[in-house]
Amino acid sequence: MSYQQQGVVEPPVVAPGAPPALEDDILQIEALSYWQSVWRVFKRDKVAIGGGVTIVLLILACFIGGPAFAHALGHGPDELFNDAVNIGGIPVGPWSHVSTAPYPGAPGHFKSVLFPLGADSGVGRDEFLRLLYGGQTSLEIAIFATLISVTFGLLMGATAGYFGGPIDMIISRLTELIMAFPVLLFIIALSAVAGPQLNAITLGFLPNGVFTLTVVLSVFGWFYPARIARAQVLSLREKEFVEAARMVGASDWRIIRSHLLPHLVAPMIVISTLAVGGNVLAEAGLSFLGIGIQDPISSWGTLLEEAPQYYLQDPWLVLWPGLMILITTMSFNLLGDGLRDAFDPRTAN
């Protein structure tokens, strides 16, 4: 077997009369695989790596830190505390110790609990815990909606690009219809007509409203991955390796699954990272308008919905959820930009 077949550079030619080269002195460079070359480019992008690390820390803080802090603080995100609301209905500020008395002036001795970021509104709930549990809701919607929309869009785009003809025409017209559909008006009408019934669908483990928003964002978010996948498959279906697969009798679906979809992994990964940030913003906007997640379920959008009425007395209530949304979307966008550069063969040097 030659050096090229082993993925090793041939040893240098020794000039006549020169001392024989030692085996340890021969430079051997192993050939890099595609994913190794992608990682080599990506790890040089410190900003993208910082975005990825921030995403991991956010997920750990919300899904593991939320229950851990609730246990440590001795109360949950939905518990109400009368002492957490000042005169005039203004929530207490950061780092406040709040009495657990059931009503002001109740007889007996009651312990105090800590509100690290103050109360969330005039009903007296812990802003810090609701911020962490709200992150669970927002991230669940964003990630689930992205997975469903990208998977469906990938299959639709690959099918349209490979088969062409009437199938391509039908899928392309459907894609254009989804792109032109007035999504916000549809969500408002859906919320008014069947909002409570749809929000009650939890599948046994989701908070109220998560399933509804996930489905809505998935239905109206698959067109972009579909267009990208269709364009890629149109350029790949006439390649020699596809023709060779047809000649040996491979079925159309086997060609799509085994020969075309692997080429779409890279662009779909980039699209997914960017789509998660967009879905976080979409959930926050819909919940802020009152047609997304509904109180008492916490999300970053519902926290923003309640905050503006206290922005003069307690501007921190606007800052905390807004900062979490900003950090999350920026981290996903930076990660997506880094992955896009890493998957670009022009940067592999």
Image (cartoon, rainbow, N blue to C red):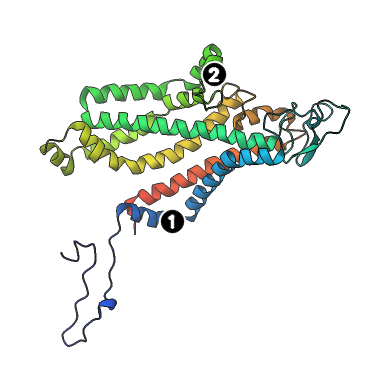
| Horizontal relation, residue 332 to residue 171: left or right | right
Q: Position of residue 108 (x, y in %)?
A: 87, 30
In which quadrant of the rendered view does residue 14 lie? bottom left
Q: On screen, 3 above or below 192?
A: below
Residue 220 seen in render: no
Q: Spot the residue most to the left.
A: 247
Give the label on residue 200, or none. Answer: 2
Q: On screen, 291 above or below 267?
A: above
In which quadrant of the rendered view does residue 209 lie? top right
| Horizontal relation, residue 274 to residue 230: left or right | right
- Secondary element under disc 1, as helix, strand or loop, is loop
| Residue at mark 1 to residue at mark 2: CA–CA distance | 44 Å
| Horizontal relation, residue 33 to residue 244: left or right | right
Q: On screen, 19 above or below 29?
A: below
- In this view, the residue in front, 177 or 27, is 27
Q: Spot the residue most to the top.
A: 193
Q: Position of residue 72 (x, y in %)?
A: 69, 42
Give the amino acid at mark 2. Ala
Task: Return the residue at label 1.
Answer: 43
- Secondary element under disc 2, as helix, strand or loop, is loop
Give the amino acid at mark 1. Lys
User: For the point 16% across and 65% down, which residue is it?
Assistant: 2
Quarter containing the N terminus: bottom left
User: For the point 13% across and 41% down, which residue is it?
Assistant: 244
Q: Position of residue 296 (x, y in %)?
A: 64, 24
User: For the point 46% across and 27% down, which residue is it?
Assistant: 217
- In this view, the residue in front, 156 or 113, is 113
